[in-house]
Structure formats: structure tokens, C-alpha cells
Amino acid sequence: MKLILLAALVVSCLSAPVPLVIWHGMGDTCCNPISMGSIKRMVEKNVNGIYVKSLRIGNNVAEDFLNSYFKNVNKQIIEACAMISEDSKLSGGFNAIGFSQGGQFLRALVQRCPNVTMFNLISVGGQHQGVYGFPRCLGENETVCNVVRDMLNIGAYDKVVQYELVQAEFWQDPLNEDEYRKKCIFLPDINQENTQNEDYKQNLMKLHNFVMVKFLEDTMVQPRESEVRQGPTSMASSTCIFQHHSIHNHFYDEFYCVILITYFTHLKSRPMLALHYSYPQAVALLGVQPYSYHIG
């Protein structure tokens, strides 16, 4: 099993490849050498001339880590929007990959930040319909996760918890739908569960492709079905779903190659190929040899 590396999905045939923006998940950072940092280096090494921006929310890596738990998501979206808008290298448009909660954050960015141009979005294990359950964390994240769990136990829809805890802002309690819609300050808005925002819909439909990756053996995201669902009126013009038998953000190289070769090695203006192709068919169709990059 390899850590997912979807970053090379945006390989371009042009001399100046389409830039790539990536947004990490909970408990990670923009520049972690064994996750986002490795992805960034790999893409830069193997896609000549590509510009990769790994979003850092905060003034340093330590803040970025803590903000993945404790910075209001709506403020994060505003910060990311400004960061991208002010980057001249992204002014002509870019592709994006969001890992775990970074997936729904980038979707919110598309909906709320119309002055940036995102061509394609890949959500890797994102929670577009929210979560109802908090995973057990290991290693250095365990202490922070215990604090998060204690805050959720106080009450996910408590006003203070909502404004201070990231995961509460996409916590969807199926036993308290009314309270969720009234008091949750992030997810009901981007899923348009209270009011219909035509701008959100139109902005999302400007995406050429929106790909959601679901991990069928995921024990991190509860429920895992959230990885491939959205609100009913917030669909992109071309929404595609991949499912794979693996745990959160992991899969075998072959599956990676299918996505890499079949779907995102095309120019930004071309649509995806149909989803029914198998791996060998995709390779034969495109006339290329399979290859992939991964980290352990």
C-alpha cells in the first residue's frame, strides 16, 4: 500500500504545465517531508517546469498544523482565496487536489472565491457530506485529537465549539438535523441546505471536472460515504467518482496509474475520458506505458 500521490495527475503536454495547488488534511502541514512536501518535490521533479503551491494556513508550519484543528474554516477559505489571488503564477488558472478535509475546503474555495480559476479538482477522501464520528489518532497527533474529542463531547453545535473547532464545522449529526442546519457554520452553507446560492452553483459548474475518491476500507472518515456525496444543488459540470479497496488516502500503484494516465494527463480544456475504461484498456487507448510515483 502506498500513500496516495495524485499530484502528477495534472501533467500537461504544454511547455508550461498547468500549475497545481494542494491542500492538506487534518493533522498534516503544507510541507511535511513525508506527505505534502514529498508530493510537491515529486511533481516538481517529474513534471518539468510545473509550479506547485502547497497551501499553508498560518505564519509557519506549527501554526498550519494547529490551524487544521482550531482555525475557523470560513476564515481559512478567505485566507486561501487571498493567497491564491495574490499569486501571479496562478493567475492563468490551476488544477487542485485536496487531501481529506482539504477536499471540501477546496470545493468551498471554488464556490466562494470567483476571482480564481480552477480547472479541475480532485478530492481525495474528502468529507463532502460531513462526519459523525471522530477517529482515533496515533503518534504526535494523539494529544490534539483527544482535545478535539473532548470539545465535540461538550457539544459540536455549541457556539464556541463551532467557531473554534474545524471538525465541528462539518459535523453532521443525523439525529439532530435541524440543529445541524441551524447552528453548523460551514457545511450547510456550501451544501446549500438552508438557502440556495446560485453563485455557488455557477462557480462550481465552471470546473471542467470534479473527481471524488472514496476509500472502501476507510476507518478514518465516518461515514465513508461522505467522501463521494454532495449537496443536491452544488454539483460540478462533470462529477466523477473513483472507489478503491484501501484505507484512508492509500491505494495500490495500479489504481493510481489508472487515474494518472486516463484522466488527468490531458490539456486543461479537454474533458475526461469515460469512466468505464479498465486499466489495460486505458493504457492501450492512450498508447502510453504505465508509470507511477509513490512514497512509502
Image: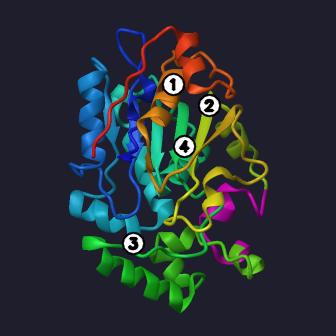
Q: Secondary structure at mark 3?
A: helix
Where is residue 94 shown, x and y percent of the image? 45, 29
Kind of residue sitting beneath label 3: Phe
Badge number at residue 113: 4
Q: State the residue at coordinates (40%, 37%).
A: 21
Q: Which residues are magenta?
A: 181-195
The residue pinned by badge 3 equals 70
Relative placement, left or right, of 2 versus 241 is left
Classify 10 Å Cα crowding around label 1: few (below 14), some (14-19), many (20 and above). many
- The reply to whether discs 2 and 4 touch (Cβ–Cβ < 8 Å) is no
First along the sequence among labels 4 and 1: 4
Q: CA distance from mark 3 to mark 2?
A: 31 Å
Q: Residues within 10 Å of mark 4 (few under 14, many from 20)?
A: many
Q: CA distance from mark 2 to mark 4?
A: 17 Å
Which numbered marker is on residue 209?
A: 2
Query: Element at badge 1?
Result: loop
Q: Give the distance between the C-alpha atoms of the residues marked 3 and 1, in whole angstroms.
A: 33 Å
Q: CA distance from mark 4 to mark 1?
A: 23 Å
